[in-house]
């Protein structure tokens, strides 16, 4: 029995049944248990064979040779053991062990020796299933907590044991809170703060056990709460244990979700949180929307401090400041001289407190872009008027260079008119009086640099109005931005254009004008040809009708003369 006992201790799910009557004995077990069916008989009755059957069907057949041995087939194991007693004859235990029992194992079991049938055992297997999905509850000292365990079974004959254990205190390692037998309360804790109740379901299958703990104390948090259903002495089906986790009352104080910066400008990402307990570990990661990849930035722990995982010229440093006012901490992640690879990413800060709690917050680091925009639309009334173009820029850094260009509509050619550098504007065209440039700083702008760029085209020509004007600004940090203005045409300009097309010989020198002239001539030629063909076809059709009508008239005159004088002969 030593081997059998060791298996029992490992599995924890065994049922022993002792036959007490000459008729049969009923025993109950539950799905998943290991079950023992035991017959006792005098050794003088042991023959050469043992036959174990269930509902008349043979399960095991055992032939005894010189010594008693164990026999195993599948889930079934047969054991024979001699037991010494005060009686003259020794007693032999015949044990049938069924492993991992199922509903199909229910039935009548018999032992047949030398054609002699011994006491019958009826095995009833029932189903039982715990229906709970939680194993940890967050609480606070002073709270009232309800723990509910739900179960489903087809049986009404079982015991339920509810208890708690304290891993820290060995003297009070197990404390029984309540015990029910076949639905009746048999034992309950003497602690008035711990109230347990068994509530059967209306259909008899689904029930629940409720444990209500009043005024949670710190010692209650250290216990592990367990419940099990017992169908016999050694068969208990446990549910997952329930533990408590003290609420640390954690929440983020950070209000910043995005931060604007520029390359090579150091920046600090600041997170703040409120908590009864401070962080034991902090992990920083970042995510790029362009590459859809996460990257580890660094980690802080109480034992190792801050470690960075980024191999680049950018330096990351961490500063933690305890905030006694808000019962929390301020986390400052400094990024020294970030590159473009460090910006336009989402930085995550995950705080770990003890082993069971963590929370995450994010800040998006965005590149600050310079802004350059035209002030308003430009409308020119007549050729020869001055054309004024105005742009305004705003940025953290000052302008280093400004370039003015124009692009013609008809050939897409870009011509540089001039550029500004170190407070001096250089013209790139031969006419020194054609373009006037002026830059006016905005002294009221406090977030960096701002200025108004004014470009005046003097004595405009047709070329000046058939173009788009482009202003490009390069700033001292290397960032560049561009903006363009397209002058609008109005009716006065179109009237002047028609006058120029008649009187000015230079009109036909414009490729676009020549194209439209050729197109207009081609269309006019097509119209003339179409009209000519139509007139010709019309004339031919009318001429044919005339000849046909003349011939029909002559034929009718001839037929009429023959009717008047049948003997006459027509000369026609």
Image: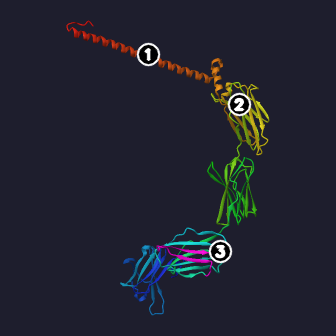
Which residue does the image show at 65% across and 65% down from the upper left?
A: 357
User: Camera-side residue: 514 or 36?
Assistant: 514
How far apart are labels 3 and 2 at the CA level? 82 Å
| Residue topped by disc 3 | 215
Residue 229: percent from the left, percent from the top? Answer: 52, 76
Occupied quadrant, residue 143 = bottom right
User: Camera-side residue: 226 or 186?
Assistant: 186
- Write down the region rendered in magenta: 190-219
Residue, far left: 567
| Residue topped by disc 1 | 536
| Residue topped by disc 2 | 416
- Based on the picture, tell me whether residue 168 belongs to the magenta stretch: no
User: Camera-side residue: 86 or 150?
Assistant: 150
Disc 2, SS: strand
Can residue 241 be seen in this snapshot? no
Which residue does the image show at 44% across and 91% down from the upper left?
A: 89
Can residue 110 be seen in this snapshot? yes
Q: Nearer the viewer, mark 2 or mark 1?
A: 1
User: Looking at the image, is mark 1 or mark 3 earlier in the sequence?
Assistant: 3
Residue 345: percent from the left, percent from the top? Answer: 67, 50
Q: Are marks 3 and 2 in contact (CB under 8 Å)?
A: no
How far apart are labels 2 and 1 at the CA level? 59 Å
Q: Are there few (<14), some (14-19), or many (20+) residues within 10 Å of tag 1?
A: few
Disc 3, SS: loop
């Amino acid at each position: 029995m030593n081997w059998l006992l060791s298996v029992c201790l490992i599995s924890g799910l065994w049922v022993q049944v002792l036959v007490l009557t000459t008729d049969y004995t009923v025993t109950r077990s539950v799905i998943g248990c290991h079950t023992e069916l035991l017959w006792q008989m005098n050794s003088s009755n042991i023959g050469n064979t043992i036959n174990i059957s269930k509902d008349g069907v043979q399960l095991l057949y055992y032939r005894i040779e010189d010594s008693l041995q164990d026999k195993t087939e599948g889930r079934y194991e047969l054991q024979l053991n001699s037991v010494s007693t005060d009686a003259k004859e020794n007693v032999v235990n015949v044990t049938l062990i069924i492993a991992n029992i199922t509903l199909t194992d229910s039935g009548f079991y018999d032992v047949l020796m030398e054609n002699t049938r011994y006491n019958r055992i009826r095995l009833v297997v029932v189903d039982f299933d715990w229906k709970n999905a939680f194993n940890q509850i967050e609480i606070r000292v002073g709270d009232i907590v309800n723990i509910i365990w739900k179960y489903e079974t087809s049986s009404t004959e079982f015991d339920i044991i509810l208890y708690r254990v304290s891993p820290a205190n060995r003297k009070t390692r197990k404390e029984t809170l309540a015990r029910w037998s076949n639905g009746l309360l048999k034992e309950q804790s003497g602690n008035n703060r711990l109230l347990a109740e068994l509530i059967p379901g209306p259909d008899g299958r689904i029930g629940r056990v409720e444990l209500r703990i009043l005024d949670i104390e710190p010692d209650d948090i250290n216990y592990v709460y367990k419940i099990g259903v017992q169908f016999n002495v050694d068969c208990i089906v446990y549910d997952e244990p329930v533990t408590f986790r003290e609420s640390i009352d954690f929440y983020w104080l950070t209000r910043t979700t995005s931060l604007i910066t520029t390359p090579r400008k150091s920046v600090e990402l600041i997170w703040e949180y409120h908590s009864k307990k401070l962080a034991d570990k902090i992990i920083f990661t970042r995510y790029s929307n362009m590459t859809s990849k996460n990257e580890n930035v660094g980690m802080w722990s109480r034992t190792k401090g801050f470690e960075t995982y980024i191999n680049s010229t950018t330096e990351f440093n961490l500063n933690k400041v305890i905030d006694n006012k808000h019962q929390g901490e301020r986390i400052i992640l400094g990024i020294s001289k970030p590159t473009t690879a460090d910006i336009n990413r989402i930085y995550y800060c995950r705080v770990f407190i003890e082993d069971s709690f963590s929370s995450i917050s994010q800040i998006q680091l965005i590149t600050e872009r310079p802004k350059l925009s035209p002030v308003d639309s430009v409308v020119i009334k007549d050729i020869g008027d001055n054309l004024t173009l105005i742009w305004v820029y705003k940025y953290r850094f000052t302008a280093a260079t400004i370039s003015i260009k124009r692009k013609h509509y008809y050939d897409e050619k870009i011509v540089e008119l001039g550029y500004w550098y170190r407070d001096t504007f250089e013209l790139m065209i031969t006419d020194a009086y054609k373009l006037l440039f002026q830059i006016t700083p905005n002294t009221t702008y406090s977030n960096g640099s701002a200025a108004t760029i004014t470009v005046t085209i003097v004595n405009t020509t047709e070329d000046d109005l058939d173009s788009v004007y482009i202003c490009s600004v390069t700033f001292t940090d290397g960032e560049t931005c561009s903006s363009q203005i397209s002058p609008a045409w109005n009716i006065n300009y179109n009237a002047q254009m028609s006058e120029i097309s008649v009187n000015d010989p230079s009109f036909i020198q414009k490729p676009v004008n020549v194209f439209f002239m050729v197109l207009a001539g081609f269309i006019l030629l097509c119209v003339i040809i179409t009209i000519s063909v139509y007139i010709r076809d019309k004339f031919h059709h009318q001429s044919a009708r005339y000849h046909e009508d003349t011939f029909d008239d002559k034929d009718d005159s001839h037929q009429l003369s023959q009717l008047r004088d049948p003997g006459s002969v027509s000369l026609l």
